[in-house]
Amino acid sequence: MNQPSFWEIARRPKWISGLLAALAVAAVFAFLMQWQLSRTFNTVGVSVEESAPRPLSDLIAPNQPIDKPVYDRLAIFESTIDSENSFIVGGRLQLEADGSTRTGYWLITNSYVENASLTIAIGFSEDLETVRQAQQKIEDLKIAAVGYVQPSEPVKESSDADFDSVALGQLINFYSQEPIASYPAYVILQSGFEGELEPITIGIRQQEIEINWLTAFYAVEWAFFALAAFYLWWRLVMDQRARESEALASEEPK
């Protein structure tokens, strides 16, 4: 008798059911692979289109959570400086043109965009006394400014400055004893305010793709498992063929 071919065995109901089971398992593994791939490639930084200044109201709103990428975006706005609520923040890094940094102090102040509080960072200096002198000269004036939107920071204690972080939840308690509308981010001014301090320079990342190699490895692993499901079905069919071929061979007259 002729030995059974692979496809003769594979077409039997038992092995068709096995193939369907392998397809179901592979589909689950393929879904897990796609899920890991979606976490592998992340877009970070600011694109060329996003680098153009936008009205502040297009990016953030008072008392509203931030649910879209707005940090490091340039915002255009008009506000009135609240000179009675200005503070000095220590432990700040000033980025140089050659990529190096200097440590110093920021002068920040509350301001009002209409009736909502907006914290703005005005300038930088390595010398604490220079910042204190600039603080004494702040006046209640209206400015038309452009600046980078930045996230609130955790609270940190400071030994020489007022604070060592721009923590909006902490600052709003100094601005007013009564609840007031406030923006969920602060702005580092780039233009619109003339003072004696240096303009603050920070590193703005251009848009790029970051790869999470750990999740990439997991994605490859799930793809391997999906292929393994088909390989196991093929191996079982081949084993069945080998058993039947041996049985036929033993029945043949010698």
Image (spheres, rainbow, N blue to C red):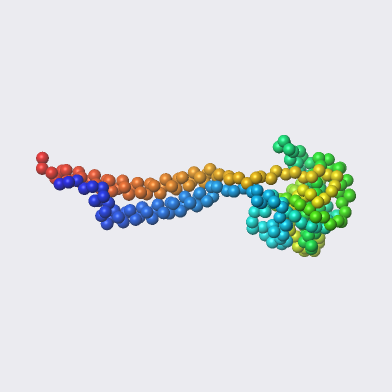
Does residue 101 appear in the picture of this structure?
Answer: no
Q: Is residue 234 left or right of residue 51?
A: left
On the image, the x and y values in percent for residue 239 come to 27, 45
Residue drawn at point x = 49 percent, y = 44 percent: 217
Residue drawn at point x = 48 percent, y = 46 percent: 218
Which image quadrant is residue 175 in? bottom right
Residue drawn at point x = 76 percent, y = 62 percent: 181
Q: Is residue 126 left or right of residue 153?
A: right
From the viewer's side, name the closer residue of 207 and 83: 207
Does residue 107 appear in the picture of this structure?
Answer: yes
On the image, the x and y values in percent for residue 231 come to 35, 46
Residue drawn at point x = 31 percent, y = 47 percent: 234
On the image, the x and y values in percent for residue 38 come to 52, 51
Instruction: Say above or below: 184 vs 201.
Output: below
From the viewer's side, name the closer residue of 128 and 200: 200
> Quadrant where the C terminus lies?
top left
From the viewer's side, name the closer residue of 49 and 175: 49
Which image quadrant is residue 92 in? top right
Which image quadrant is residue 110 in? bottom right
On the image, the x and y values in percent for residue 187 come to 75, 52
Total labels: the figure holds 0
Considering every residue shown, the one lying at the far left of the view is: 253
